[in-house]
Structure formats: structure tokens, C-alpha cells
Image (tube, rainbow, N blue to C red):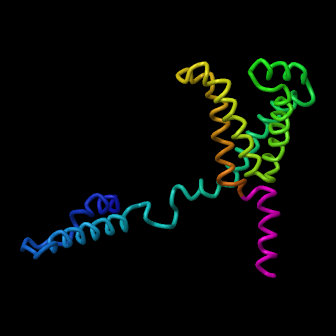
Amino acid sequence: MERMSRVMNCGVRSRPEIHSTPFPGRGREAARSSALKKILLECRRHAPLGNKKGRPMDFLEKLKPLGFLLLRCALGIIFISHGFPKLFGQTANWLEGFSRMGFPPYFAYIAGVVEFFGGCLLIAGLFTRVAGLLIAGEMAVAIWKVHLPQGIYVVKNYEFPMALCAAAFTLATVGAGVLSLDHAIFRRKTKVRTKG
């Protein structure tokens, strides 16, 4: 309680005096700016989150590798389940379906390869940025060519592929995380080059 009261009143208790005497030119503005900076620094110093020890978000920060792993596995399972039937299941139906949607029939094979093998790579955390970028690109094309023509305001028609596209693009930009083959392989190569 005492600490909170110090935080709440830091602007009053630690406020340096601003002289009311006029300063030539911009002297008065500079003095006020300096005084405000001192107040903010004092508030930050007494704030509960200002301490480096025991910050509430430290626990979640330690779970970041697990978060990346769960995101990769979730996306991988989804895309494997969508890519498998295109390659090893009802391939003829998918060829016909892609033709009806205005794509060349062989696009079904391309989509199947990207989804199935891309999903496997995401789960393993291998070439994650490349796999994520390819999957995000495929979802973007699907949204643009298939879902958006039905109406941009009918969000329920493209909310799922949009979420998948955003998640895959996120992995493409931030990488696989520590719990991945990317981290194990490429970090080791970087260390070898540094030693050499």
C-alpha cells in the first residue's frame, strides 16, 4: 500500500520546482520539459512493474518457446489434414473442384503438396519460415479468388482461412522458436562458422 501511494503521488511528491521567473527565449519551455522528464523518471522508478525482479509477465515470457511449438503443431495438423486427401485420397474430386473454382486442375496437386508437406515441416520446425510463407501465400490466394468474391462483408466465409493466413505469416516472420529443428541445426552451424 505504501508503495502504491508513492506511485500515485509521485507526480506531486517528487515534482521539482519550476521557477516562475521568465527565461529568455525557450528557457522556460526547456525548464518545464526537464521537470516533466524528472517526474516521469521518478514515477517509473517507483512503479511496481519497474522492478526487474518478479514481474508478472516473466512467467509468460518463459513460456514463449512452448507457445511457438503449440502454434506450429496446431497449424501443421490443420494443413496436413487438408493436404492429405488432395494427394492420397479423393484426388479426382479435388481436381474437379479446383476446375469449378476457376483454377487449373493441377493446382489441386500444388495445394496438396504445400499443405501436407508444409504442415509436416511446421510441426518439425524445419524450414519454418519458408513453409509458413508458402502456406500464407496459398491462403491469401484462396481468400482473394474464392471467398472475397462472395462479399467482403460476409466475414464468416473467409474468417478461418484469414486466421490461418495470419498465423502462418507470423511464423514466417518470427521463426519457429527454440523448440525446433531450425534452432538446433542452424544455430549449431552459426556457432561453427563463428569458431572457424
Q: Which residues are magenta?
A: 178-196
Q: Is residue 194 covered in magenta?
A: yes
Q: Position of residue 7 (x, y in %)?
A: 32, 61
Q: Position of residue 28 (x, y in %)?
A: 14, 71
Horizontal relation, residue 6 to residue 166: left or right: left
Residue 149, by quadrant, is top right
Q: Pick whichever, 44 or 31, lies toward us.
A: 31
Q: Residue furthest left?
A: 21
Total numbered circles? 0
Q: Position of residue 5 (x, y in %)?
A: 29, 59
Horizontal relation, residue 67 to residue 94: left or right: left
Q: Residue at x 21, y 63 (%)?
A: 12
Which quadrant holds the C terminus?
A: bottom right
Query: Is 111 located above or below residue 9 in the figure?
Result: above
Horizontal relation, residue 175 to residue 118: left or right: left
Q: Pick whichever, 192 or 25, lies toward us.
A: 25
Q: Is residue 107 covered in magenta?
A: no
Q: Residue at x 78, y 40 (%)?
A: 76
